[in-house]
Amino acid sequence: MYSFIPSHPTYLRYLILLSLLLLAHLSFAQNCPQNNLNVAEVYFFDTDGTPFTEDMEFTPGTVVEGQIFVQFGGSANNAYSLFFAYDLIVNDVVIERTELCLFQGTNVIKDKPQYITDFSLTWGDKVEFGNIFMRWYTNPSPDCPSVEGSAAQCYANPGTFRVNTPIIPLPVIWQDFSVKKSDDGQSHSIRWSTAKEWDTSHFEIERAVGGVDEFEVIGEVTSVGWSDKLSSYSYLDPKIPGWGGRVYYRIKQVDLDGSYDFSPLLMIQSAENSTSLWNAYPNPISDNELKISYAGKKREELIQVRIYSMSSIFSASYTDPGTQLDLSHAIKNLPKGVMIVEITTKDYVESIKVVKK
């Protein structure tokens, strides 16, 4: 079985979106004939107070901080304690709905821009501010009204106001991503597809074991380059860790100019390898003595040995190791405790847990 990492919860995202749409529907379903207080204009400034424009020199993908100002209009001179709600919409998807209490206990200031809140955007995204809903009291009140159910006037605007920034298409639209374990548990089949690609050079398959702190590139697949149709790719990872545990995968899409984008993360639970070709002894280790032996025929190839302890890593390569290797020199300066001995050949990776007393 594999699962999406919680930092990328697609299903939950759809549930949130559905809830927001239902909330907006309930809000706009109210009878809001009042137009004596309305939203005349929405302004988007950077943190220096400069209006956003399409020719600002930000690198696509950069997170930019900004501020939202609203200019209120209408004939009302007695609008107090304003309940103000809006949707933040990115690339035509509702990201979040925000509810604010403005001018608490005071009259709403009209005909000049008023600071509402801070926000951030990713340069190149289409960012909109919309589905505005307001409620207010006609007499001074220390608290703002709720979404519904109180004696207050209201205003609704289902339209949107777009931040004046350039819309830069993503280099790739990810369609699907999956990882499947082989029947014998010795390899993982990685498959992904894209709905569209622009100027893509290749894909790099990255893997991390046990956690998501350190990814390594384990393979590369050439892209179709440019396509507005579904494109499918696959890669076989034959060297999964033999001690079992969580294995994480992601795909790095690399553009022709070197820019890149990552797929969502996937995690798969790797089973412990029950077929061992190597044996470590003595285990537990005593007197700083450790050897590994090979159960098969004499090996006449390059192998790499890594020993992982809690604070150190030993790494060495051996040519023509035969059927036995003495690793006593490697563990001499390693601390006591649990260690993992990892043997890598051109065909597979095997790991053995040992304990140094």
Image (cartoon, rainbow, N blue to C red):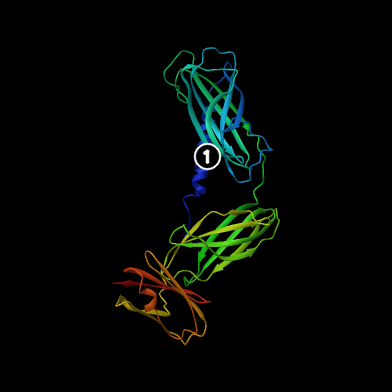
Q: Against 258, is 59 above or below?
A: above
**11 sits left or right of 329 in the view:** right
**Residue at the limit of the structure toward the bottom, as seen here:** 298
Tell me residue 253's x, y (percent).
Answer: 61, 57
Report crowding for label 1: few under 14, some 14 to 19, many 20 or more residues within 10 A (C-alpha).
few
69 vs 5, nearest the viewer: 69
211 vs 183, nearest the viewer: 211
Under mark 1, the amino acid is Leu
Q: Against 113, is 192 above or below?
A: below
Tell me residue 165's x, y (percent).
Answer: 65, 37
**245 sits left or right of 33 in the view:** left
Q: What secondary structure is found at the residue carrying circle 1? A: helix
Tell me residue 291's x, y (percent).
Answer: 37, 80
Q: Against 153, is 347 above or below?
A: below
Q: Quadrant of residue 46?
A: top right
Q: Residue at x 59, y 13 (%)?
A: 75
130 vs 12, nearest the viewer: 130
Q: Identify the residue under disc 1.
A: 18
Tell me residue 240's x, y (percent).
Answer: 48, 69
87 vs 205, nearest the viewer: 205
**Residue at the limit of the structure toward the front, as seen here:** 333
> What is the count of numbered marks?
1
Q: Quadrant of residue 164?
A: top right
* The C terminus sits in image quarter: bottom left
